[in-house]
Image (tube, rainbow, N blue to C red):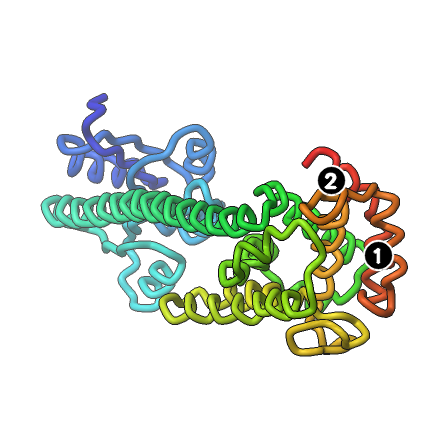
Amino acid sequence: MDTKRKTIWLVDDDAASLEVGCNAIRGYYNVLTLDSGEKLLQALEKNTPDLILLDVAMPEMNGYDVIKCIKSDPATAHIPVIFLTAKSDVESEFEGLSLGAVDYIVKPFFPLLLRKRIEIHLLVETQKQELVHFNHRLLQMVEARIFTVLELRNAILKTIAELVECRDDVTGSHIDRTQKYLRIFFDELQKRGMYKEETDSWDIDLVLLSAQLHDVGKIAIKDGILKKPARLTDEEFEEIKIHSVFGAKVIDKIGEHTTDKEFLEYAKIFACTHHEKWDGSGYPNGLKGEEIPLLGRIMAIVDVYDALISERPYKRAFTHEESVSIIVEGSGRHFDPVMVDVFLGVAEEFEAIGVGG
């Protein structure tokens, strides 16, 4: 068998028709003859031809029944089928084409015409396969490019966030821990079925990525205040409050140069609302209760917990137990009581991250 040639299977219950068809194409293709639809389907379990020439009027299983089996199997559905038949009525031709045949040739046929029509359909099939392969390669290239761009974007975001935190004498581990805390918090909300409609609408990966920018507004605060090794004065605290508003402005500015609005919406919520308090005494807008977005209420707990367990120029690091106690005491005043309850359900997981972070 010539491995370079295409393989054609000719299926007909009439020996004379098999011989005529075989003689017409044998010098151009590798040919296998089969005298029933059943034998064709059995052969297809082991091998796949490039094209099938199929008679319609066969006993037991006619050509229409055979093509239905071929097209219903994903392993063989792609094989082009040409009907060779003595039926010349329009209804029979329409039925054959409707069932998935690529052509319908009436016997007796001219060998030259048969070969040309086979050649055309094989060429079409080859071009289809080349297009599929090309699209697959193109998709791989696009995905690789997108991955590279996303990696670069994520690296830039993380670097910016770490630079901001370093100005506050906080290591980049704060950012990593914050994202881990948030992931745990989101998982717990999902387990409890809380705020399901809202949380189901979140792209969690984007939410976690955007959380890195929750304190980006600190770039507007003077080092003398950020690094002060003592409690801030009232005037200095008023200035520190600016970072929430400035953070929102920075994110809005970024939005002028990108269409990635969903990511920026999450980032702005974190930046602008994680210092709001449940009783309305927070900043920058004095939001109260559920006026504060859910993400802001969650970040308020996450951010405070990590600040409490971390050493700062103006304070020692509190123990996990002390930190949990402070958050519980702030329930209903600083923090959403419902979110505090969720926090208590995962506090041990927070502790493990704080110790390892």
Residue 94 in percent (x, y) is at: 34, 65
In the image, is 332 to the left or to the right of 163? Answer: right
Q: Earlier in the sequence, mark 1 or mark 2?
A: 1
**Badge 1 is on which residue?**
327
Residue 344 to residue 236: above or below: above
In the image, is 91 to the left or to the right of 45? Answer: left
Residue 209 in percent (x, y) is at: 55, 53
**Badge 2 is on which residue?**
354
Q: Amino acid at mark 2?
A: Gly
Q: Quarter of the image holding residue 40?
A: top left
Residue at image position (13%, 47%) is: 116
The kind of secondary structure element at disc 2 is helix
Residue 59 visible (yes or no): no
Residue at image position (61%, 41%) is: 173
Residue at image position (63%, 45%) is: 174
Report the Cα–Cα distance between label 1 and label 2.
15 Å
Residue 230 visible (yes or no): yes
Q: Residues within 10 Å of mark 1 (few under 14, many from 20)?
A: many
Instruction: In the displayed orientation, state which residue is furthest to the top.
Output: 1
Residue 39 in percent (x, y) is at: 44, 34
Quick one: 265 or 320, which is closer to the camera?
320
Residue 224 to residue 29: above or below: below
In the image, is 277 to the left or to the right of 74? Answer: right
The quarter of the image holding the C terminus is top right
Q: Residues within 10 Å of mark 2 (few under 14, many from 20)?
A: many
Quick one: 246 or 199, which is closer to the camera?
246
